[in-house]
Amino acid sequence: MNIEIKNSVKDQYGNSKNNIFLAFSDDGSYLGSSYVYPNMNHCQIEEIPYLIFIDINLEENMDKLLKDKVKQELFDKAFFRANEIRKERPDLNARIYSGFEYNMDNMKFYTRNSFEEDYSIIMEANINEDFKYTLPKEVEVIQMNLEVEEELIEYRQMYDEIFISPLNMDRFIEQSKEECFKNLYFLVDGKRCGGCTIFKNDDLGYIETIYVLPEARGKGIAKIILNYIFNYFLVNGLKKTKLEVWELNKLAVRLYKSFGYKEEEKSLMFPGKNL
């Protein structure tokens, strides 16, 4: 069977049609798609700011041989396009990568295509019962009001600039219903410097996000935020804390380890290739 691959139209996220590929069989049946999405991110992985994401989606009702063939051809198109996009910013370190649920078959496919293994990891830490922390006098903590639409819009815009994946608003709203939920801003001398989202999950203090704005980096803000979180969890009877972090985010991993976090398991996979 011959496979014809065409470009799509511009998608709902504004991605160029040149970055979207659709696969069809001889009789015009849809077989699958792939796309490339470039993202400039100086916040989450400072040493590799140019991230180019590849994703492949296949129709389910195909035999394995056809699936393998379609997947490879869609990957080849997307990878070639990703390399073209990478050349637009030769001044920056770049990484072409993919992301999916923990699945060794997918990981093997990407490593066969010259990608390196990379993971999102689950980390946990115990909080000492005698732990206490007092915020420096120049630091103020403000909780976001989810009932104010303008605050939600502002937070979403800021989140999408900082993190690689856009904010999943439905998931965020669901998290807000959990016990001990807080979405906090940290201000130093009246200027916003960072923030976090935390809640209780399975009797653990769960950290969904911690971030420091670019202009406030290198000033110990992340440590202030983590100390505050530990104190908040302990006051609420939570003696153990959990989070998930991209293994490639070396600075964050080192920070969490300094607070006693240890890797418990691997979760999502992010195989990729630095260029």
Image (spheres, grey):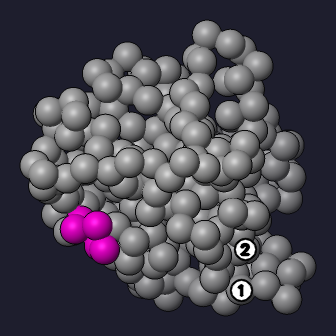
18 or 275, nearer to the observer: 275
Note whether 165 is above or below 237 in the view shown. Answer: below
Q: Is residue 198 left or right of residue 15?
A: left
Crowd rating for badge 2 (residues with CA inside 10 Å; few <14, some 14–19, many 20+): many
Name the disc covering residue 83, or none. none
Residue at 50% across / 52% down in the picture?
A: 136
**Magenta part mainly helix, strand or loop?**
loop
Q: Identify the secondary structure beneath mark 1.
A: loop
Q: Are marks 2 and 1 in contact (CB under 8 Å)?
A: yes
**Mark 2: amino acid:** Tyr
Left or right of 6? Residue 242 is left
Q: Residue furthest front?
A: 137
Q: Is residue 200 left or right of residue 21?
A: left
From the image, which quarter does the N terminus lie in?
bottom right
User: What residue does disc 1 label?
Assistant: 93
Q: Which residue is mark 2?
A: 50
Residue under the image location 33 percent in, 32 percent down: 199
Q: Is residue 259 magenta?
A: yes
Q: Quadrant of residue 144?
A: top right
Judge whether residue 262 is colored magenta.
no
Report the magenta residues as a range.
257-261
Q: Position of residue 29 (x, y in %)?
A: 61, 40
